[in-house]
Image (spheres, rainbow, N blue to C red):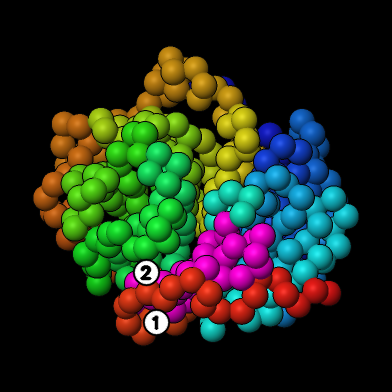
Amino acid sequence: MEGGELSKATLADQPMDCCFHPSANLLAGAVITGRVECFRFEGENTHRVFDLKAHSDSCRAVRFTTDGALLLSASADCSILATDSATGAAASRLEHAHGCGVNTLECIDAAVLASGDDDGVIKLWDVRQREAIGTFETHGDFISDFTYSPDNNSLVASSGDGSISVYDLGTRKLIAQSEDDADDELLSVAVLKNGKKVVCGSQEGVVFIYSWGYFNDCSDRFPGHPNSIDALVKFDEDTIITGSSDGLIRILNILPNKMLGVVGEHDEYPIECLALSGDKKLLASASHDNTIKLWDINYLHDTDDAEDGAEDVPEGAGDDGSDMSDSDDDAKSKAKAEKTRMKGKGKGKGSKGAGAGPNFFQDML
């Protein structure tokens, strides 16, 4: 395997999230102090473009809009801020986007934004109309991650209550929810196999695999991570890259399940988030060492090179890397180190229709 660490950005404090601009060489980081930092990268060089005091409490999520014009950030202070990505100037703010801290954002397209909070509430926002078009109270604990499935025009959410939920964006309705697992939090999610499989990283270090349309329970399990899988990104329809609290970044093939290798590490610091560049040649990883590292993963586009670096599948994982029994659970520690952004418990299930909540970014600065 070639590749390796290309460069890194050092932030003022611990990053909680990171993301790439869709077309420019820009990388943004959400900082636990409430700041948003943006960096320009070129080869092995990285320099700060702007540093904004965006929120009064920790900044937990950052996403560029699909056209790259705005950088959106969400915070424990319950607000969502839009920042001009070219100038670093705050453009507009929604002060009370949620009733509690906002954990995660997903820009579906130029018109629709999704946000999820500590209590498990999910909101869809119409950016053009500047209003909430749907509120869902499906989950009983924090929303940990989102992914959009263009094959199914659906939003998939993972939650600390141990379940995933699926929303049809055409009808803006809940269409499925898996059974929750009180003993295991789901922390990250992606859709693979052209919309046919959903994979989730868990607190116990197992990748849960669901078949689309059959969400009651997982169809396969891929153990092997010794610690929680706090982040994962889809590389292609068969491959994911995971970030674990043991500090390692791993490459996994899904169905057949096989650990292909390790991209790199942040020593023993937990991996807080991962992000892929638009051309999928760079991977960003943020950790508690106050850095966002950039990794050259261009070699993954060559299948032979990727397979040359494959590692053995962990013992007990089965012939294809799966483990349909629960025997691996006994070997895992049940102690859970709650992440600083994971707070609060939800208050029931259900959904609210269009028009719920305040107008989107109505409080112009």
Which residue type carries mark 2?
Gly
Identify the residue at horizontal 13%, vertical 54% (top origin): 327
Disc 2 target residue = 160
Residue 186 drawn in magenta: no
Q: Residue at x 56, y 71 (%)?
A: 132
The residue at 23%/54% (across/down) is: 215
Q: Where is residue 70 in the image (x, y as percent from the top left)?
A: 74, 55
Q: Give 157 or 304, whichever is nearer the viewer.
A: 157
**Where is residue 170 shown, x and y percent of the image?**
43, 53
x, y percentage for residue 356?
Answer: 51, 77
Question: Can you say whether 166 is above or below 32 in the image?
Answer: above
Query: Which of the pair 119/108 is nearer the observer?
Result: 108
| Callout 1 crowding tier (Cα within 10 Å): few <14, some 14–19, many ≥20 | some
Q: In which quarter of the image is the C terminus?
A: bottom right
Question: Does residue 122 belong to the magenta stretch?
Answer: yes
Pointer 1 with pointer 2, Cβ within 8 A:
no
Is residue 113 visible in this depiction of the protein? Answer: yes
- Mark 2: few/some/many CA within 10 Å (<14, 14-19, 20+): many
x 30%, y 41%: residue: 197
Please tell me whether residue 355 is drawn above or below residue 269 in the rendered image.
Answer: below
The number of numbered discs placed on residues in the rendered structure image is 2
Q: Is residue 43 left or right of residue 185?
A: right
In the rendered view, does 46 fall on the left or right side of 249?
Answer: right
Amino acid identity at mark 1? Lys
Image location (x, y in percent) of residue 295: 62, 36
Assign a secondary structure to mark 1.
loop
Tell me: residue 277, above or below residue 56. above
With 146 as the anchor, is 161 left or right in this view? left
The local secondary structure at tag 2 comes to loop
Label 1 belongs to which residue? Answer: 345
Task: Identify which residue, 73 or 336, lies in the foreground.
Answer: 73
Q: Magenta part of the protein: which range?
A: 112-140
